[in-house]
Image: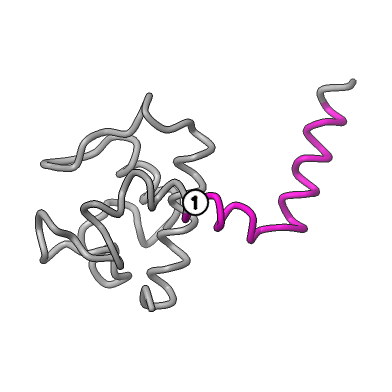
Amino acid sequence: MRVLLTAAIALFLSFLSPGIALADGGGVFSANCAACHAGGGNLVNPERTLSQADLKAYLANYNSDHESAIATQIKNGMGPMPSFEGVLTPSEISDVAAYVESMSTNGWG
């Protein structure tokens, strides 16, 4: 019963404060991703940025579930991008995916 109550409270609070995940995602992004993806760019492969158009073009399933497609890329990596599974927690991966989606929607400005 206590587990269910805790889960319900956490879910409720997540709806009240979506900005917290974005702030956490931004911090995790800065610490782990910005070396290659500063400002939504891509230092290693400049043609594959974190712009919404590029995410749509290069990520499988982006059109059906934006954040899940981004989280899968973060978790598994691909090509020169390393996997962050085991480096970041599942929660951190979700927060970074939400941050990247938000920033790509707003043009990384």
Is the residue 52 above or below the residue 8 in the image? below
How far across and down, in percent of the image, does residue 20 sit?
Answer: 64, 54
For the stretch drawn in magenta, what is the main secondary structure? Answer: helix
25 or 64, nearer to the observer = 25
Q: Relative to residue 15, is residue 29 drawn left or right?
A: left
**Which quadrant of the figure contains the N terminus?**
top right
Look at 37% across and 46% down and name the residue there. 31
How far across and down, in percent of the image, does residue 5 sit?
Answer: 87, 31
Residue at which label 1 appears:
25
Q: Relative to residue 29, is residue 55 drawn left or right?
A: left
Look at 47% across and 56% down and name the residue there. 26
81 or 1, nearer to the observer = 81
Residue 17 highlighted magenta (yes or no): yes
How far across and down, in percent of the image, does residue 70 sit?
Answer: 36, 51
- Dividing the picture into quarters, in which one does residue 22 lie? bottom right
Q: Residues within 10 Å of mark 1 (few under 14, many from 20)?
A: many
Q: Which residues are magenta?
A: 4-26
